Amino acid sequence: MDCIWEESTKIQDKGKRVSKEPLVRDFSSSTNDILNVNNNMVGRGDQKEHLLEDLIGSYSGEPKVIPIVRMGGIGKTTLAEEVYNHESILRRFDVRAWATVSQQHKIKEILLSLLQSMIKMDNTVKTKDEAKLVDILQKSLKRKRYLIVLDDIWSCEAWDGVRGCFPTEDNAGSRILLTTRNNEVACYAGTENLSMQMNFMDQDESWNLFKSASFSNEALSSEFETIGKEIADECHGLPITIVVVAGLLKSIRAIEDWKSVAKDVKSFVTNDPDERCSLVLGWSYNHLTRDLKTCLLHFGIFPEDSEIPVKNLMRSWMAEGFLNSERLGRKG
C-alpha cells in the first residue's frame, strides 16, 4: 500500500500540472454507492426498518440526531441513501438535504451542498460568505419538518461547526442523520438511545451480495457456487471487501482462476477488519494491468467525495499516452 501511495502522489503532482480547468465540487446528493448493486440494496432489511421507525417516529421537542456508526466500507452511506429516498420519508418530511462532510471538511461547502438540495442556486449564492449561507439555510428550514443527512463525518469539531445551522424551534419531528466511523462522534452528537451500530453481513447476505456483484442474473454452476460461497465467507461480512473481490471475478469464468482467488483471500490471516480490507484492496489493485493501475491512480488527483470532471480526467490520461488526442478531437 505504501508504494501505491507513493505512485499516486507522483501522478497527483503531474495531474495538477496538466489540468488547467478548475475543479467543480459536487454539491448534489451522493452518487450511487458501489455497495448498492444494480440500484438495489442487498440485505440490511432489519436495520433499514429499524432506522425508518426512528426517523418517522413521534418524538417531541428538538430535532433528534441519529448516528449510523461503524468502520468504512460496511455500508453506512448505502443504508442512509436507501432510507433518504424511501417513500415513507418523502411523505413525512417537508424538506430533505444531504451533504458529504469527509475528513478535510469545509463548512461553506457543507452549507452549499445542503442548500442545493433545497433551493434553486445560482452563482450569486455560491459567492456569499458562511454567515449569509447559514441565514439562507435557516430560513429555508424554518417551521418545517426536515431531514438532514451529514454523510461521513469524522470529528466532533465538524459537528460543532454545523450543528448551530439547524433551527430547533417549531421543527417538531425533524431529524438529522449522521454516518461516521468514529464512536466518539456518535456519542457526542447523537440523541440518547438513537445511535445505530451497523452489523457485518451474515452468511446469506454475504453470498447474495457476492452473487449479485459477480454474476448478476447469470445462472451459476454448482462448482462456481461452491467456490463463490467460500470466497464470500472469507470476506467476513464486510460489504466493500465482498464487492471488490466479486468485481474482479465478474469477467472471469475459469474455475481454476476462481480457486486461485479463493486461496489468495484465505491467506489474509487477520482478525482486524480494517487490516483485512486494506489487504484485499491492495491485492485487487495488484491484479490490474500496469496501464489500468496508472489509470486508476489518476482518480487520486481529484478531491475526496467530489464529482470528477471527465475532461480533466481524460486530459490527464492523454498526458500519459493512454488516449489518442487526435481521435478524441475528431469524435468531439
Image (cartoon, rainbow, N blue to C red):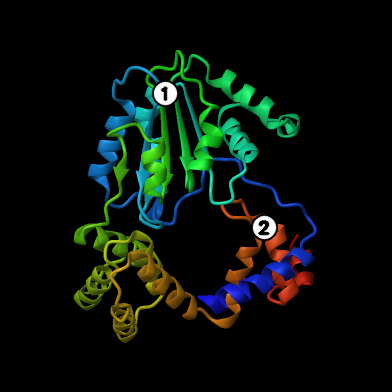
Q: Position of residue 330 (x, y in %)?
A: 78, 65
Q: Position of residue 244 (x, y in %)?
A: 40, 67
Where 33 sits versus 320, above or below?
above
Q: Which mark is residue 117?
A: none
Q: What amino acid is labelled 2 in the image?
A: Val
For marks 2 and 1, the one nearer the N-term is 1
Local secondary structure at mark 1: loop
Q: Quadrant of residue 231?
A: bottom left
Where 84 sits versus 132, above or below?
below
In the image, is 275 to the left or to the right of 287? left
- Viewer can see residue 217: no
Number of numbered discs present? 2
Q: Quadrant of residue 138?
A: top right
Residue at (49%, 46%) from the top-left corner? 155
On the image, numbered disc 2 is attached to which residue? 310
Q: Quadrant of residue 292?
A: bottom right
Q: Position of residue 180 (x, y in %)?
A: 42, 47
In the image, is 222 to the left or to the right of 23? left
Local secondary structure at mark 2: helix
Residue at (29%, 20%) from the top-left corner? 58
Where 67 sits versus 225, above or below?
above
Nearer the viewer's eye, disc 2 or disc 1? 1
Q: Position of residue 37 (x, y in %)?
A: 38, 55
- Viewer can see residue 139: yes
Q: Which mark is residue 93?
A: 1
In the image, is 11 to the left or to the right of 170? right
**In 3D space, how far apart are the residues under numbered discs 2 and 1 (Cα atoms)?**
35 Å
Q: What amino acid is labelled 1 in the image?
A: Phe
In the image, is 192 to the left or to the right of 25? left
Local crowd at mark 2 within 10 Å, few (<14), some, or many (≥20)?
few
Residue at (27%, 56%) from the top-left corner? 200
Q: Which image quarter is the C terminus in?
A: bottom right
